Image (cartoon, helix red, strand yellow):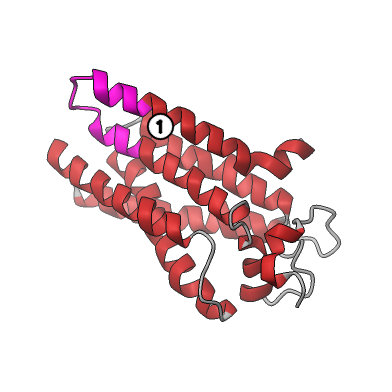
Amino acid sequence: MDFYRKHWHDIGIGLAFGISIAMTIFMTLSRKKRSRAQVWSAWNFVALLLHQFEEYRFPGYFPGQFNAGVFKSETPDHYPLNTQSAMIINTALAYPAYILPLLFPRKVWLGLAPVFIGFGQVLVHGIVFPLRAKARYGPGFVTALCLHLPVGIAYIRQIMREQPVKRTDWVKGVISMIGFAVGGIAAPMFLLRDKVSSYRFTEQQMGPYGHQ
């Protein structure tokens, strides 16, 4: 568990590579159009994995910016976010939100929820966090802008081609996105926060915020 706690974002890169190969083969060989939205959901999951790698490995100092820059923590290497809560939020809670649209592609709102989450990533990493931290850049912004945004737009266009999208689908998608932000990110982070936690981020993950 300790190994996974430290390297889940690295393992995610291998998972992203495997999904990318599988989706490329599927799109090359499949003649069925009904699953194209499902394919975009898979690419959105890949975008998530790459986004997490940018946050926690390269450049990787999202934890430092989040704890020190956004929350002004005096112990930013483990409070309020620590390696345990980060692992749980980004894998046990985030992965299902992105995998469910693959299992139930006709439940459009399930696919819209992670798409909206991706759109939100552009705002928080590109504007909210940098402004709060008085920084020029927020780790996670490049993948949010270059992957989450175009993949999300492509997914929305595809579902509108394949089937009528009901108003309730949009509403459920937004509600689910808000629910994940609260129940899948904010709540576990604050429930698992610990000022004396031994689950500490590395010096690299602190980046420029490790010597303030």
Which residue lies at the image location 61% right of the left edge and 36% below the top edge? 11
Q: Horizontal and vertical percent for residue 14?
A: 55, 33
The x and y percentages for residue 176 are 41, 51
71 shown above or below 24: below
Q: Is residue 72 left or right of residue 139?
A: right
Q: Where does residue 56 sit, x and y in percent of width and height?
A: 62, 53
- Residue 116 seen in render: no
Q: Which residues are magenta?
A: 23-41
Q: Residues within 10 Å of mark 1 (few under 14, many from 20)?
A: some
Q: Is residue 80 magenta?
A: no
Q: Nearer the viewer, residue 206 or 106?
A: 206
Which residue corresponds to the image point at 77% horizontal and 74% vertical from the top-left?
211
Q: Is residue 88 visible?
A: yes
Q: Which residue is mark 1?
A: 20
Residue drawn 76% across and 63% down?
77
Q: Quadrant of residue 33?
A: top left
